[in-house]
Amino acid sequence: MVGGFVVFAVGLLGLAVVLHSVNRAIVGGNLERNAAVGVRTKVTKSSDVAWHAGHLAAAPSLLAAARTGYVAGAATAVAALVPALTGRPYPALLVIPCCATVTLVVLLLIGTRKANEAGRDAADDSGS
């Protein structure tokens, strides 16, 4: 049981680090259109203008997702201590990483929607 908590904790913390890094690149203006990293949708990939506008719009959601991942990863690591120290399983504690994962997915979907809207608007404004 402890192993499952550890996997969840490492996964949440790892995802949080990636999201935070992408957010910092967006806010710093260092995330150019590329084939590997970013909010990669048909709209955001359509032009540099759409890419930048979309990512700026998605940045708050990415930061919220990163912060959620940090907090939930730490809480999951602490939750792993309970069965490890007591020797008894506490499956109800799996609610922490499961709810955090759902929250992360929702925040990423919100960010993607905002990126698409902003990218579409920016492309329309620039005539791309």
Image (tube, rainbow, N blue to C red):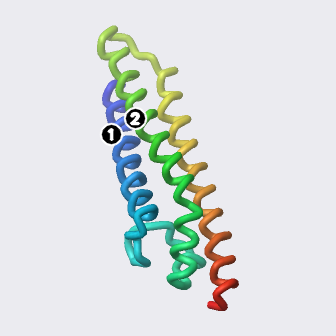
Residue at left offset 39%, top offset 77%: 35
In this picture, is 110 found above or below 126?
A: above
Point out residue 32 in the picture as x, y percentages from the top left corner: 41, 76
In this picture, is 25 found above or below 95?
A: below
Amino acid of disc 2: Gly
Q: On the rendered image, what quadrant is the N terminus found in?
A: top left
Identify the mark nearer the N-term, 1 or 2.
1
The number of numbered discs placed on residues in the rendered structure image is: 2
- Quarter occupied by residue 108: bottom right
Q: Under tag 1, what secondary structure?
A: helix
Q: Which residue is mark 2?
A: 73
In this picture, is 36 found above or below 88?
A: below
Residue at left offset 33%, top offset 25%: 2
Point out residue 44 in the picture as x, y percentages from the top left corner: 55, 76
- Quarter occupied by residue 124: bottom right
- Quarter occupied by residue 36: bottom left
Q: On the rendered image, what quadrant is the C terminus found in?
A: bottom right
Q: Which residue ends up furthest to the front in the rendered image?
A: 28
Q: Which residue is mark 1?
A: 10
Q: Would you say 18 lies left or right of 119 here?
A: left
Labels 1 and 2 touching (C-beta < 8 A): yes
Q: Would you say 114 lies left or right of 45 here?
A: right
Amino acid of disc 1: Val
Residue at left offset 51%, top offset 35%: 98
The crowding category of the residue bearing disc 1, from other C-alpha atoms within 10 Å (few below 14, some 14 to 19, many at least 20), is some
